[in-house]
Amino acid sequence: MTDHISHDILIIGTGLAGLRAAISAAMTNHKLDIGVISKVQVMRSHSVSAEGGTAAVLFSDEGDNIESHIYDTIRGSDFLCDQDVAEKLAHEIPNEIYQLDKWGMPWSRRDDGRIDQRKFGGYSFPRATYAQDKVGFYEMQTLYDTCLKYENIHFYNEWFCTSILDDGNNNFSGVTAIEMKSGNFNVFNSNSGIIATGGAGRLYSFSTYAYSSTPDGLDMGYRAGLALKDMEFVQFHPTGILPSGILITEGARGEGGYLINNLGERFMKSYAPEKLELAPRDVVSRSMIKEIDNGRGFIHETGVPCLKLDLTHLGEERIKEKLAGIREIGIKFSGVDIISEPIEIRPVCHYMMGGVHTNIDGQTEMNGLWTAGEAACNSLHGANRLGANSTSECLVWGSITGRLAAQHADKRKEKGSALTNLENKVQTEEKRIFDGIFRGRGEVNPYDIRKEFTDMMDIKAYIFRDENKLVEGLKKVRELRDLAWKHVDDSAKEYNTNFINVMEIDSLLRVGEIIIAGALNRRESRGAHSRTDYPNRDDVHFLKHTLAYFKEGGGPQFSWHPVTLTRYVPAERKY
């Protein structure tokens, strides 16, 4: 017999967006029962890895202004972002910065006591609000501590959600989940939900993401009939260290770091003469690959071509004060002390601009279900995200979706709505999970399949793309999907990570297919999506969002969605 657990609101994911949503819901109505589910322990969520800053306009008296933040975001997105969404972010995020301050966030401060901000790529003002180089960790700790003050927030650590349930009339009704500790299959019933499961960067081998960052949440939404939007737009951060891919924050360049080639040149002067190293990430990453392709790179000891980030001129005192965490990462994972020598770096998978399709308020196509943070695509980032806007998005839309989910849950509670009988859907999901995967058998090692797939993504869907590579990639992902790979050797129920890993691979292959197929369909170069066979941006045919819908037994079904233009006409980007 499947156990049923009920909450007024369910939040899936415990990163910045999930925790902010939980607090917002609890503050909106203290009588509502809030369940927060995570496949890891709360403070192991990948948001703790955010390093550089949270973008906000704090000093209008010193020359910054809201309109500038709006325009920088729109221009940075290569004009694919919905402009009303950029406006909402710029207006709302200063309040979130000050709210975190009141909750105890240890922001780095100036000598006069005001919150400090640093330069970041693509901005026309130092706008990245930071806490040394550990902003995500401190924001997470602040939010988690605040959550613990509310008795109506209940955490479920180490539960793996497998599907979203609806009542047959497109109303959210809950999720199915496996408790890792026991291996038991459970149903969480609820009338209001928020997907906040983060990004899916482990689709690539060379990645800044935690190993837990797989597209489980995206895949659940997709299989439940929700569109995944703009998935072809994958951000590659310029500075991932070799060989691990661990991130060197953009704050390192914000503090004055140089990118250099094997001639010792600051080569960005040839590509973005105005912004140099602080051009948007897509511009810098493409420039780096061009330098490498033109023979001006270094060769890492593993044989991988790379460039170098030089921070030595900043001096020991400044590095220890502003970039202590980065120095520690360099010493531990590259054997390099950034105080005394440059560190080898290469563009690395870092962020998904795409996600579950939502409106400006994070509402999905299912009644009673919202999405926030990197799992969502409210079209804030368009074709390219500016650094420090992601943590801003998590805070703003965590707050918005938490409030709206609480209001929805309260209305449903007042109506006394009974949950529709979901037994057939639950049984179908249980059969898919246990008969199709757990008890499945095959000759192929699933971990070999995963490695082959993510290595293929590194080659076929990297910074520069073309039709031949993408067609080969699509063929390969479908071959890997069709192999009898659903193969769990470990038969134990308790803490069966082998079982969890194989379910993750299921979602990786499905979402990877969407990324490649979407990239094939978009015959232009825009933001992070760069086609060598279609090198120009094409506003006539492709100033629109990609929507991918699940089709039983086949590949994704694609359609287009209009871009909201309210303030600025698309123009050529120059930095």
Image (spheres, rainbow, N blue to C red):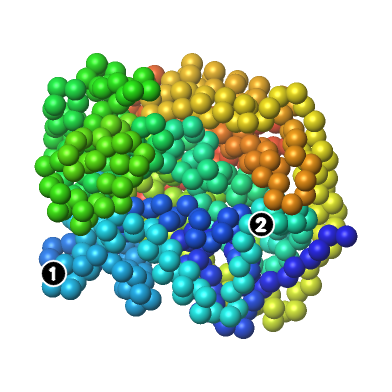
**Alpha carbons under labels 2 and 1: distance apart:** 45 Å
- Determine whether label 2 and label 1 are within 8 Å by CB: no
Please name whichever residue, 566 or 519, is drawn nearer the observer in this view of the structure: 519
Left or right, 266 with respect to 121, comes to left
Residue farthest along the right direction in this orientation: 1
- Would you name the residue on which mark 1 appears? 111
Q: How far across and down, in percent of the image, does residue 169 sit?
A: 74, 59
Q: Nearer the viewer, residue 471 or 541?
A: 471
Element type where label 1 sits in the image: loop
Name the residue at 50% across, 66% down.
19
Which corner quadrant holds the N terminus? bottom right
Q: Quadrant of residue 106?
A: bottom left
Residue 91 drawn above or below residue 298: below
Q: Is residue 489 left or right of residue 66?
A: right
Residue hosting label 2:
159
Mark number displayed over residue 504? none
Q: Residue at x 40, y 59 (%)?
A: 137
Image position, residue 548 (x, y; %): 58, 40
